[in-house]
Amino acid sequence: MKIEINRTSMQQQQLHARLMKCLSCSHSHLPLPPPRPPPFYSLQRFASSQPKGVAKVILKKGKTQLFKDGSPMVYSGAIDRIIGRPPPKTGDIVLVADGTEKPIGWGLYNSVSMFCVRLMQLEEEATRDPSCALDMEKLLETRINAAVELRRGLGLPSATTNAYRLVNSEGDRLSGLIVDVFGDLAVVASSAAWVETYKSKVKACISSIDEINHIHWRPSVEILKEEGMDAADLKELHPSTCPQRTKVIENGISYAISLEGQKTGFYADQRENRMFLSTISHGQRVLDVCCYSGGFALNAAKGGAMSITGVDTSLPALELARENIALNNLDPEKTSFLREDATVFMKGALSRNDSWDIVILDPPKLAPRRKCFRHV
């Protein structure tokens, strides 16, 4: 009897082991449970975690879509109210929300400017990649790096072009910041208060680019005054060691550039237009009105134009234009540069029945400030 019980016990143990083995085999073929979804990030959640809190700018009804579609400058007329105590100060990070107080993005506040907020990141982006949410320095680094990679993908810089626009304000989603590269020199054009606030970070990001050895900071003083900046605060504490003149190459054409000239010293955003002109100029009579340092005129000459006339009011600009003709070994007999007001010149040309095959007209701003709109 004792032996029989032991045998039965052994059989039960063997059966149990077989069952467990079968169960483990069958479970190995079952699909794994789905992974847990990542935690949901929202700007409201980020803002709530800030030690000082973040004010909220509420848009008027019907104004939200404009900014969701990409317009970064929230003008005062689009704002219904501001929630936050104390109220935000110029330079503060704020949420921008629709009429239901749901955030659509975040940006930088300005209590003086006609653009009360410059949107920096939309809600969908912050949800997708929260690494830059409400972090202006991290966002700057990310956007400038993206701008560098975009230009690299376009083949810039290259052996035939080392003058190009690295950061194109709204085009690179950094409204108010322009950076033009001229060889190993970067010229920063600042036209928003936030750019001045984050000046050291902007410089640090640009300095990290391999080919950049010098940075020339050029604030747009009149515009920045309207942003609430004091002109005295815009002066460099330490004199710049950058050269005031440099030479660059664009589409195989050499240019002497003066950093004391207009804008950044060279209109790098017109590169493709200048190159196009060279393809249609052969045998043509070309007029370049507001020619500055001769960018279009040089391309017309390279393209084989019969004659080129350049007109500008700036004597230093015209001297650069003549220098650039010589720099490229072009025939000075085919190109003439006249110092004259564009309107006066065109009226005179009309009275003389002068005509040209191609006319380039690239004037300066006709209404540089808001108060000028009343007179235009």
Image (cartoon, rainbow, N blue to C red):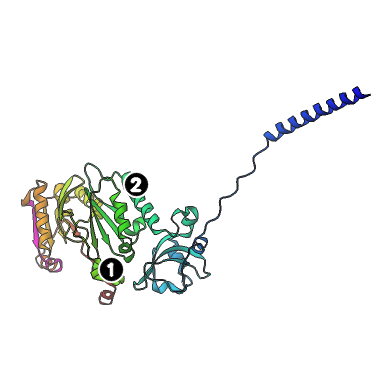
Q: Residue at x 29, y 55 (%)?
A: 203
Q: Residue furthest bottom?
A: 374
User: Is residue 337 one of those drawn in magenta?
Assistant: yes
Q: Amino acid at mark 1?
A: Leu
In the shown orientation, is residue 143 left or right of residue 28?
left
Q: On the image, which quarter does residue 86 sit in?
A: bottom left
Q: Percent x, y for residue 278?
A: 19, 49
Q: Residue 117, relative to residue 374: is it above or below? A: above
Q: Is residue 303 visible?
A: no
Disc tally is 2
In the shown orientation, is residue 102 left or right of residue 305?
right
According to the picture, the residue beneath numbered tag 2 turns out to be 149
According to the picture, the residue beneath numbered tag 1 turns out to be 224
Q: Amino acid at mark 2?
A: Glu
Cα–Cα span, label 1 and label 2: 29 Å
Q: Secondary structure at mark 1?
A: helix
Q: Residue 17, relative to residue 132: is it above or below? A: above
Q: On the image, which quarter does residue 122 sit in?
A: bottom left
Q: Which residues are magenta?
A: 334-345
Q: Is residue 359 visible?
A: yes
Q: Percent x, y for residue 219?
A: 25, 63
Q: Residue furthest top?
A: 3
Q: Percent x, y for residue 23?
A: 74, 33
Lower sequence index among marks 1 and 2: 2
Q: Percent x, y for residue 125?
A: 46, 56
Q: Residue at x 21, y 65 (%)?
A: 364
